[in-house]
Amino acid sequence: MNKLLFLLFLSSTFIVFSQDRGFPNKPIQVSGLVLDQDTNTPLEYATIAFYSPRLQKIITGGITDKNGKFTIEINAGVYDVSIEFISFKKKTIHKQKLFKNTNLGTIKLGLDTETLDDVVVIAEKTTVEIKLDKKIYNVGKDLTVSGGTVSDALDNVPSVSVDVEGNVALRGNDNVRILINGKPSGLVGLNSTDALRQLPAESIERVEVITSPSARYDAEGTAGILNIILRRSKLQGMNGAITVNSGYPWTAGVSGNLNYRTGDFNFFTTSGYNYREVPGNSLSQTRYLNIDSNGLDNPDTFIDEEREFDRIRKSINSNIGVEWYINDTSSITTSFLYNSGDNTSNTSNSITELDMNGETLSRNARFDPEIEDDITKQYVLNYTKDFDDSGQKLTFDFQIENTNEDERSRITQENITAIEIVNTLEEQNRILLQADYTLPIGKESQFELGYRGNFNKIDTDYLVQLEDNNTITTNTDLSNALAYKEHINAVYSQWGSKWGQFSYLLGLRMENTQITIDQKTSNDLNKKNYTDLFPTINLGYEISQKQSITFGYNRRLRRPRSRFINPFPSRSSVTNLFQGNSDLDPSYSNAFDLGYLNKIGKVTLNTSIYYNHATQVFTFVAEDTGETAIIGADENNPGTEVPVIKRNPINLSSSDRYGFEFTLTYNPNRKWRINGNFNAFHNSVQGEHNGENLDAENFSWFARLSNKITLPAKINWQTNMMYVGPNKTAQNESKAVFSTNLAFSKDFFKEKASLTFNISDVFNSRKRMSTSTTPTFISENEFQWRERSFNLSFTYRFNQKKKRQRSQREFNGNNEFEG
């Protein structure tokens, strides 16, 4: 119904704007040819716009075809005709008297090489654009994620890794700030891991990897920022694409992006539905070291715990909006986002007690059927004012969103008649206010000033009840209601300039954070209020047209999430629980980054060395709670008492992380492309907790290799391999993980359609295997969130084709200082 209303709205708008706009009601045709000035090759998808000096607005426009030709129907009149193509100089033909069918002839565009230096390498799989404070990856043609999710797409972006549980890390650091279109978004939701698995990969246009954020960005995220830009076109007329997919374990989905521009309005939507079955499993083998208070060594207890996960994920997401070009210098964009998730997760938990010889003493089965409903609604309003052609700009943003996440479980245990009822109800309300002003000074300098206010409130109601013989009682030790408020007000300014081959961007951000933690159940009220300064420095030096050096420094922080500070425990099993820490303080970091870029023939090399010093770092520790749980109990067996293990976050004193990474791209020919990414880092942590020394030294690395080749019959074959080296902390040691994704794709109907088959985790090896060692227990763990999967997807594009393949440098002064 909503889609029908949207199409009716588009149709009515088209009728309105097709009426007489003040020109003679005489349609004529204007044609021409657009070529690359240097190579005389056609420029496909160059944009032609017809601007009315009398009405001071763009009346209509169009794009070139694969031969660089265009034929556009307009009403007769006098127009300024502009021709644009990305990374080329814009050309404008002023005051053209168009009163009859006219051929403008051949129009040649030259590369824009006069402004500040940015580097772009556009190839078949990915566009890589290097700026002073970020790297931009266009991920639209990664075959291995076709029909997949945003989480799958991020796992193929250089410098980024996604572990088996879906947690995103940047250069091995999991404290990453994830933004959508430059702002916090309801698409990320209360649980960013689950949200990123629900959003289709086809909705992404590009990902910005920001390892040295400028002052314009929030200071949150000690690793840096991942900014996900969703697809939106501004081409005249109707264009878009639709993708349908199906796979095994059973998945099915449809997603599409649609744009319709007419006159001063651009309507856009990105929508999709996804059904996905996600089987997973875990195994934990724990040896409890039974040493009593007198130091006597009693016989150890051995517990094996196996869990099978049968999950079904259903999601609907839609982002609908309209951009209104008020005049030649002002525009208003408004959009509404709706995201709904209907998830079920059936967890079968088997706990076995063994003796020293591995013989079974008792067994207990636990079944946890969980139903989860998520709904996010978000409204966004943006106003942009360009004062003149020099780049002077003012923007205002307003964003309001509401997210509800409800989880309900009825847990049963073998030989126990009582049913444990667990309900978690979470509601988040967030308001964002933002204003940014950009003032160019001269041809080579730029000043920015801005404000951002984030006002966030999360209410969590955690209820644990026991139903026995139709009598329900509430567990007051576990049940809890938490009200969490976080208000952040920030102001920033930054100055950027360029002297010859040297460019710089200097900034300072001030943030005031006010946090209120209201434990309604225990009547505990805790408030935190702190103000901090966050300086940023980004420098660049162009050695030659093919070589450049960058340097970045920034100070950032990591605030504890509401789950981290909620002191009431939540259980994943009867023997394991997670508990927050209400005394948790923010962690601060100072980061340095030195980068080098060199293009040697068909090889592009991008390297960095980096260092990060953090204080009050978050570390998760496992402890014996002193409480016990009964397992293996039945009518003839009283069962066995085993300790309950608690996992909770604490602040340690400091950590030092330094590392090296490089990304190598090699194009032997037009049909073959190799892309490799390597990241090695060392992390040193110092601190102690409850008398236990938690100092740890860890060296780890990960490597990614992508190979894409065009086979006979124009079939594209892509293989992605990922290796994550072993990792170690004071209590935990994880083994290496190796995984491989494989995909084949074939284009049809003159590249208007594509059929892609991919296999995710070909060898079913994407598993986390780790060992936890404490003074009271030793635990061996294995976890696999998703098993090997197969997927077939079909994409059809209308008035929209795959991006033209080029390899060039782009210079764009307006974007050099983007934040």
Image (spheres, helix red, strand yellow):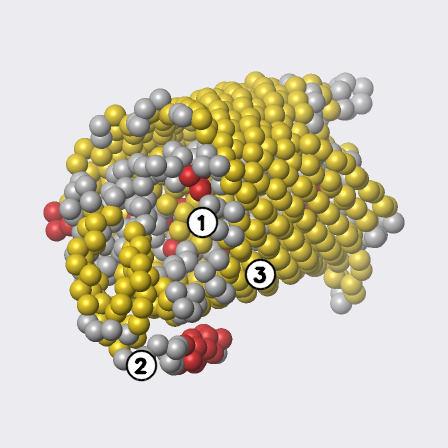
The three-letter amino acid code for the residue at tag 1 is: Asp
Q: Which residue is mark 1?
A: 389
In depth, the one of 132 and 556 nearer the eye is: 132
Q: Quadrant of residue 771?
A: top right
Q: Are marks 2 and 1 in contact (CB under 8 Å)?
A: no
In depth, the one of 514 and 79 nearer the eye is: 79
What is the residue that sits farthest to the right in this orientation?
523
Q: Label for residue 381?
A: 3
Q: Which residue is mark 2?
A: 25
- Percent coordinates x, y for residue 784 in the rendering: 47, 42
Q: What residue is rendered at 44% in x and 26% in y?
A: 499
Query: In what element is the residue under mark 1?
Result: loop
Relative to residue 167, is residue 21 depicted above or below? below
Q: What residue is rendered at 53% in x and 56% in y?
A: 384
| Image side of residue 152 versus residue 544, left or right | right
What's the CA distance linking mark 2 and mark 3?
36 Å
The three-letter amino acid code for the residue at tag 3 is: Leu
- Percent coordinates x, y for residue 361 in the rendering: 61, 39
Which mark lies nearer to you, 2 or 3?
2
What's the CA distance linking mark 1 and mark 3?
24 Å
The three-letter amino acid code for the residue at tag 2 is: Asn
- Percent coordinates x, y for residue 147 in the rendering: 36, 55
What's the CA distance linking mark 2 and mark 1?
32 Å
The residue carrying pointer 2 sits among few (fewer than 14), some (14 to 19) or many (20 or more) residues within 10 Å by Cα, namely few
- Which of the two discs, 1 and 3, labels the residue nearer the N terminus? 3
